[in-house]
């Protein structure tokens, strides 16, 4: 008989008995999962076979609930790694309201997309969850982790369902080794290359005719960050891409454009900043200033969330090691 996962049992439980099928995984790698839970939640756990007892009464309900989620996740998903379970534990700590069904959900975000679009890693699931639940979400991490793509998919879902009236896609037009003045064409021709990745993602998600229709009606607007000044955007979904290249002033300007019934998602990779040396990244500054504000969430991605070619994960990891060694040698 399948086990029913409910929180009702918690209030009378003095211990938790896990399913025998997951016992080997829970104790694997020298009790890695148990030790992580103890350190992460600052609790003591007595574990013998299937029986788990939390020795800190004030945290027992929370830990038994967590064990139930871990158990359900392993039994329903099958082959999982300990690192994946650790990511699951972090998610439940950061977003206790996210359900096991939400975590296991694999349906497409956008009803009219050209192909199914859904979060492929636990961090991506947390990201989409936070976008739904909060006014402002910052996504920080390396390229290929789906930061902009998933944000755009959620924004299009909101637009199609008429929860908002328009989508604003923007990014800083920062010169990365080549001056704008030397590029051919008028002003629009000069800034279009900076915005092209946003158009590429848009047309990858939506059929071309539907994307063109939204653009022609002004329901989807793609513009440089500088064009946001002086505007107040109500009933809108705002996405600021490549935010690591925004200045402190630009970041403040963008965040204060948010109007009623609007959401904002800010994405960036703080390891790839193209600003002049003396300019401080608005994304790094916002991470320090806004971390405690209710309604604002930060999601941090790593190389395990990269959904491009596997070689990209290895490249990112190699650069991380190089930067760490360089920093340690100073």
Image (tube, helix red, strand yellow):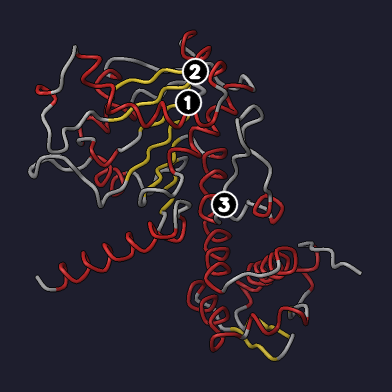
How far is disc 3 from disc 2 in space, using C-alphas?
27 Å
Residue 158 location, x and y as percent?
A: 58, 26
**Could you tell me which quadrant the N terminus lies in?**
bottom right
The image quadrant that residue 327 belongs to is bottom left
Residue 137 location, x and y as percent?
A: 44, 40
Sequence-first tag of 3 and 2 = 3
Badge 3: few (under 14), some or many (20 or more) residues near its Cα, within 10 Å?
Answer: some
How far is disc 2 from disc 1 in space, using C-alphas?
7 Å
How far is disc 1 from disc 3 in space, using C-alphas?
23 Å
Sequence-first tag of 2 and 1 = 2
Most foreground residue, 88 or 169: 169
Most foreground residue, 230 or 321: 321
For label 2, the residue is 166
Most foreground residue, 281 or 197: 197
Q: Residue at x 27, y 33 (%)?
A: 251
Q: Which residue is drawn at 66% across and 68% down?
A: 70
Residue 157 location, x and y as percent?
A: 60, 28
Under tag 2, what secondary structure? Answer: strand
Badge 1: few (under 14), some or many (20 or more) residues near its Cα, within 10 Å?
Answer: many
Badge 2: few (under 14), some or many (20 or more) residues near its Cα, within 10 Å?
Answer: many
For label 1, the residue is 237
The image quadrant that residue 162 belongs to is top right
Q: How many numbered marks does the figure carry?
A: 3
Under tag 1, what secondary structure? Answer: strand
Under tag 3, what secondary structure? Answer: loop
Tags 2 and 1 touching, CB below 8 Å: yes
Tags 1 and 3 touching, CB below 8 Å: no
For label 3, the residue is 120
Q: Residue 161 carries which label?
A: none
Is 143 drawn above or below residue 219 in the view shown? below
Residue furthest to the bottom in view is: 48
Residue 204 location, x and y as percent?
A: 50, 31
């Amino acid at each position: 008989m399948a086990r029913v996962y409910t929180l009702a049992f918690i209030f009378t439980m003095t211990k938790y008995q896990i399913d025998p099928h997951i016992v080997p995984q829970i104790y694997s790698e020298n009790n890695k999962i148990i030790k992580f839970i103890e350190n992460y939640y600052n609790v003591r756990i007595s574990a013998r076979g299937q029986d788990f007892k939390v020795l800190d009464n004030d945290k027992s309900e929370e830990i038994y609930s967590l064990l139930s989620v871990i158990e359900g996740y392993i039994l329903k998903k099958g082959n999982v790694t300990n690192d994946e379970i650790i990511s699951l534990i972090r998610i439940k700590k950061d977003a206790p309201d996210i359900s096991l069904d939400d975590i296991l959900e694999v349906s497409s975000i956008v009803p009219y997309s050209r192909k199914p679009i859904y979060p492929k890693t636990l961090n991506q699931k947390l990201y989409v969850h936070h976008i739904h639940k909060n006014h402002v979400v910052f996504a920080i991490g390396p390229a290929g982790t789906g930061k902009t793509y998933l944000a755009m998919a959620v924004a299009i879902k909101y637009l199609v369902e008429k929860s908002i009236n328009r989508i604003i896609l923007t990014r800083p037009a920062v010169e990365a080794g080549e001056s704008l003045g030397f590029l051919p064409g008028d002003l629009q021709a000069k800034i279009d290359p900076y915005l092209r990745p946003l158009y590429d993602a848009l047309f990858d998600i939506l059929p071309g005719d539907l994307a063109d229709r939204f653009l022609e009606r002004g329901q989807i607007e793609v513009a440089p960050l500088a064009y946001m000044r002086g505007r107040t955007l109500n009933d809108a979904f705002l996405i600021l891409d490549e935010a690591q290249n925004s200045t402190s002033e630009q970041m403040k300007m963008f965040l204060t454009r948010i109007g009623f019934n609007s959401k904002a998602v800010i994405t960036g990779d703080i390891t790839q900043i193209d600003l002049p040396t003396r300019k401080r990244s608005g994304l790094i500054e916002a991470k320090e200033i806004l971390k405690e504000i209710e309604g604002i969430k930060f999601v941090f991605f790593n190389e395990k969330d990269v959904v491009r070619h596997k070689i990209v994960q290895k490249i990112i990891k190699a650069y991380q090691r190089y930067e760490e060694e360089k920093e340690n040698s100073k």
